[in-house]
């Protein structure tokens, strides 16, 4: 079995486990009950067809568990590609006191206007250079990585702050602080730390325009930012992103068909399988 086929199967296993749990939830454990909906929200039920709220009932039970699935998929990619992957891994090191002060200072510059001037625009290279120029006493620091991966052949260590494709500002601020701390450790405990998004809803990197993370990173130019295929190829090697696309497409038809028939109670429309990745 080729490496890409192994990775595809591993990715499908994670997604199937999540989808089977969702289907069991919406069909058996927590189904949409029209009478209950009408009793709780009579005005809504009088104005809007039940099918609309039935759809949102499913969406809420699908979107929430998918948040943790991205990290599981990243670990699968790391194990099949680089060699090793973990979630919630703690990195411990020492950071000089002035570097810690400068990290806080940089975050404040990005968040608030200073002395009548506009907020600073993010520029990873200049920010990191400024932080690393700081000295002082060594302070013990620990950083918990969303995803930690090791290239077992080349002996390289990587940390990824993996967020949903449209992250909020507070999440991104915390991630930036963590990444700056990782690069500030002496001796450095990683060979690379990144802010990563699993896919790009805007298509190309230069078109990414979600405003909240852009307060903290130059999403179009900062090398520390990885979006979509950049992330998957980094953590899993060449071909990982295509393996991910193929894995999702192969099982997507099955689950869309089940959702139409078993949850919505209708036959899938013609060409329902065309809207895949």
Image (cartoon, rainbow, N blue to C red):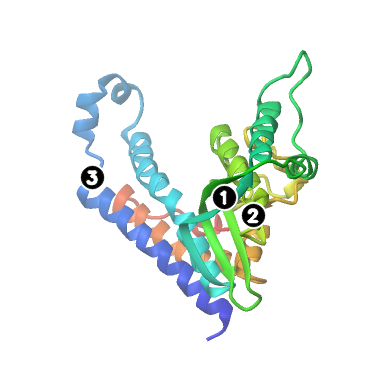
**Label 1 crowd (10 A; few <14 / some 14-19 / many >=20):** many
Could you say whether the residue bearing mark 1 is in a helix, strand or loop?
Answer: strand
Task: Identify residue for label 3.
Answer: 30
Q: Residue visible at 47% across and 74% down?
A: 9
- Do the numbered discs 2 and 1 sit on residues whose CB atoms are within 8 Å? yes
Relative to 92, is 112 on the left or the right? right
Residue 201 visible, this angle: no
Task: State the separation of the CA atoms marked 1 and 3.
Answer: 32 Å
Residue 112 visible, this angle: yes
Task: State the separation of the CA atoms marked 2 and 1.
Answer: 8 Å
Lower position in the chain sequence, tag 2 or tag 1: 1
Lower position in the chain sequence, tag 1 or tag 3: 3
Which of the image's four quarters has the C terminus?
bottom right
Task: Identify residue for label 2.
Answer: 193
- Do the numbered discs 1 and 3 sit on residues whose CB atoms are within 8 Å? no
- Percent of width and height locating residue 257: 39, 59
Looking at this view, name the residue that lies furthest to the front. Answer: 137
Lower position in the chain sequence, tag 2 or tag 3: 3
Task: State the separation of the CA atoms marked 2 and 3.
Answer: 40 Å
Could you say whether the residue bearing mark 3 is in a helix, strand or loop?
Answer: loop
């Amino acid at each position: 079995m080729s490496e890409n086929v192994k990775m595809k199967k591993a990715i499908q296993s994670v997604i199937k486990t999540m989808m089977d749990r969702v289907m069991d939830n919406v069909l058996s454990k927590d189904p949409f009950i029209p009478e209950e909906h009408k009793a709780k929200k009579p005005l809504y039920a009088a104005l809007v067809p039940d099918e609309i709220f039935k759809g949102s009932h499913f969406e809420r039970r699908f979107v929430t568990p998918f948040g943790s699935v991205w990290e599981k998929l990243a670990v699968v990619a790391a194990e099949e590609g680089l060699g090793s992957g973990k979630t919630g891994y703690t990195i411990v090191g020492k950071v000089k006191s002035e570097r810690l002060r400068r990290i806080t200072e940089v975050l404040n510059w990005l968040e608030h206007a200073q002395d009548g001037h506009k907020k600073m625009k993010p520029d990873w290279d200049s920010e990191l250079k400024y932080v690393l120029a700081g000295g002082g006493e060594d302070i013990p620091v620990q950083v918990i990585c969303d995803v930690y991966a090791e290239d077992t052949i080349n002996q390289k260590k990587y940390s990824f702050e993996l967020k949903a494709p449209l992250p909020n500002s507070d999440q991104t601020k915390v991630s930036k602080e963590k990444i700056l701390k990782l690069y500030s450790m002496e001796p450095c405990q990683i060979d690379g730390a990144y802010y990563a998004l699993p896919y790009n809803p805007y298509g190309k990197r230069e078109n990414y325009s979600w405003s909240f993370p852009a307060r903290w990173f130059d999403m179009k130019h900062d090398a520390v930012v990885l979006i979509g295929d950049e992330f998957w190829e980094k953590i899993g090697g060449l071909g990982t992103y295509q393996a991910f696309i193929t894995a999702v497409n192969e099982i997507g038809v099955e689950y869309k068909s089940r959702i139409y028939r078993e949850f919505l109670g209708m036959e899938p429309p013609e060409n329902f399988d065309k809207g895949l990745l």
